Image: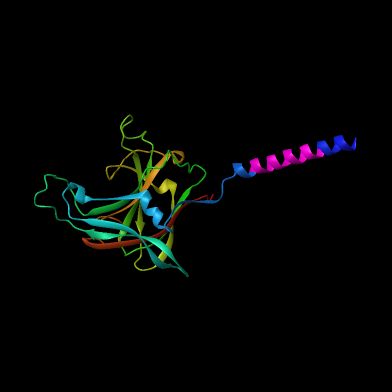
Amino acid sequence: MSRLRALWQASFNATKRALVWSSDDLIPPSERYIFNFNSKDELKRWHLYSDSEYGGLSSASLEITDSTAGADTSLTGVFSGNLSSDMSEDSTWRIRRYGFCGMRSKKFDGFIDLDAYDTIAMKIKGDGRCYISTIYTENWVNSPGQQEDNSWQAFVYTPQGRWQILKIPLDHYLPTWRGNVIEAKLEMNPARIVGMSLSVNAEGGVPGAKTGTGDFRLEVDWIKALRTL
């Protein structure tokens, strides 16, 4: 009897541990790192773009440098460059606007699923300009069957010279197509995110933000997904 009882107790304990593990596994953490600029390896996850691809003269760089982020000294990402409204004299492109740069993540290996989260948070230090946060999702809105991802955008205003943690609810991101807001009631599918970007334009943004051509600089410590509800 004692042997049978010991076997029963061992089986019961194993089942209990399995149930506890499964329960914890079903509840995701309250926050999840998407990008953390604390290593030079992070540079491999991004690529840069600008109007220079279309004959413009804007330029951008992304590097990892030592920075004081709040009370701590650590590595952070620095997205910087120069916005120009001019175009190359030998350019054959004719686009409506110049003066833009961006850093876009390379496509994830498949998708990242943020369905359990409701907010994007980023720790940043800016220059008084307004930047644009973009989330790219699997294409189902704009042109099914095409390669272009759906994009959802929100403004990121950065007071000059101080670190802040900016929180953007996912439902504040607006559907866009080639920089223009889609005038339709659409909902993002946060379970099918394929990439993200941060960009800056010489013109536009929120009232009071710095605009115009010239230098820009945005420091990024990390980008996370949060569950706040």
Which of the two residues, 174 or 112, is positioned nearer the viewer here? Answer: 112
Residue 38 coordinates in the image, percent (x, y): 44, 59
Residue 122 seen in the figure: no
Q: Is residue 58 in view from this perspective? A: yes
Q: Quadrant of residue 12?
A: top right
Name the residue furthest bottom.
71
Is 177 a magenta residue? no
Left or right: 207 with respect to 96?
A: right
Q: Nearer the viewer, residue 123 or 119?
A: 123
State the residue lying farthest toward the top. 145
Residue located at (36% from left, 45% from top)? 106
Q: Residue at x 33, y 30 (%)?
A: 144
Q: Percent x, y for residue 194?
A: 40, 41
Is-magenta flag for residue 21? yes
Residue 84 point in image, percent of width and height: 19, 58
Decide which of 3, 27 is in the foreground and name it.
Answer: 3
How does the figure colour the protein chain or chains?
rainbow
Tag count: 0
Q: Is residue 107 above or below residue 212?
A: above
- Find the magenta span and give its range: 9-23
Outermost residue, left side: 89
Examine the residues drawn in magenta and state their main secondary structure: helix
- State which quarter of the image contains the N terminus: top right
Residue 179 position, x and y percent, is: 27, 45
Is 71 placed above or below 107 here? Answer: below
Residue 7, image quadrant: top right
